[in-house]
Image: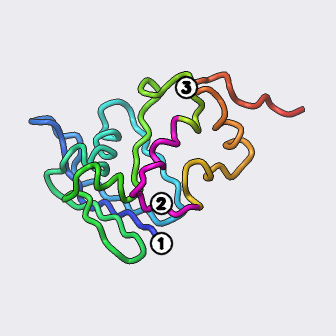
Amino acid sequence: MAIKLTIKDISAGYGAVRALHGVSVQLAQGQTVALLGTNGNGKSTLMKCVMGIVKPDTGSIVLEIDGVSHDLTRMATEEIVNLGVSLVPEGRRLFPKLTVEENLRPGGRRSRATWPSRSRPSRCWRNDAASWRARCPAGSSRCWPSPGP
């Protein structure tokens, strides 16, 4: 399954407050991207635009799955989730008694989601450190492996 996400010239905000001004990003399958910035720089707003929670004023967000394009700016959040897109909230919105992996699983369990089976959250832990971390309590800062000798 080939997947590509293209965010082009997105501008969005909350009333008179503009959080995003012409943001563009393109992600191909297998890429890992981190959004970095101080509070108020639009990281969460961009992710909410991708999920359909915030509707952008301008621009487009297109998810291409096996050559079929889906304009996320014209879809409801539930439709976006059914395509296999999900948002993992910040630490304060997690279930602290569950592990990291247990917090991720619900997003991959939508019956209509089009996740390729090899990418489901329960199967995405590839390296030892990530696999080990997935079994730690959510939000724990003391759950990293100790350094080697």
State the SS at label 1.
Answer: loop
Q: Is residue 73 left or right of residue 142?
A: left
Q: Identify the disc placed on residue 122.
A: none
In-front residue for pair 106/43: 106
What residue sits 31% from the left and 55% below the top? 80
Q: Is residue 33 left or right of residue 128?
A: left
x then y, percent, for residue 145: 75, 31
**Badge 3 local density, few (<14 within 10 Å), some, or many (20+)?**
some
The image position of residue 55, as x and y in percent, is: 18, 48
User: What is the three-letter code of the residue carrying label 3?
Assistant: Gly
- Mark 2 to mark 1 CA distance (whole Å): 11 Å
**Which residues, given as a range, are shown in magenta?**
103-117
Q: Which mark is residue 139?
A: 3
Question: What is the distance, in whole Å, between disc 3 and disc 1 at their CAs?
Answer: 32 Å
Residue, x 42% and y 50% (percent of image)?
Answer: 110
As drawn, which residue projects farthest toward the front? 111
Disc sitting over residue 2 in the figure: 1
Q: Please state which amino acid type lies under the numbered disc 1.
A: Ala
* Disc 2 from disc 3: Cα separation: 26 Å
Mark 2 lies on a secondary structure that is loop
**Residue 115 — which label?**
2
Instruction: Check the image and name the residue furthest to the bottom.
Output: 67
Residues 110 and 84: in front is: 110
Q: Identify residue type, mark 2.
A: Trp
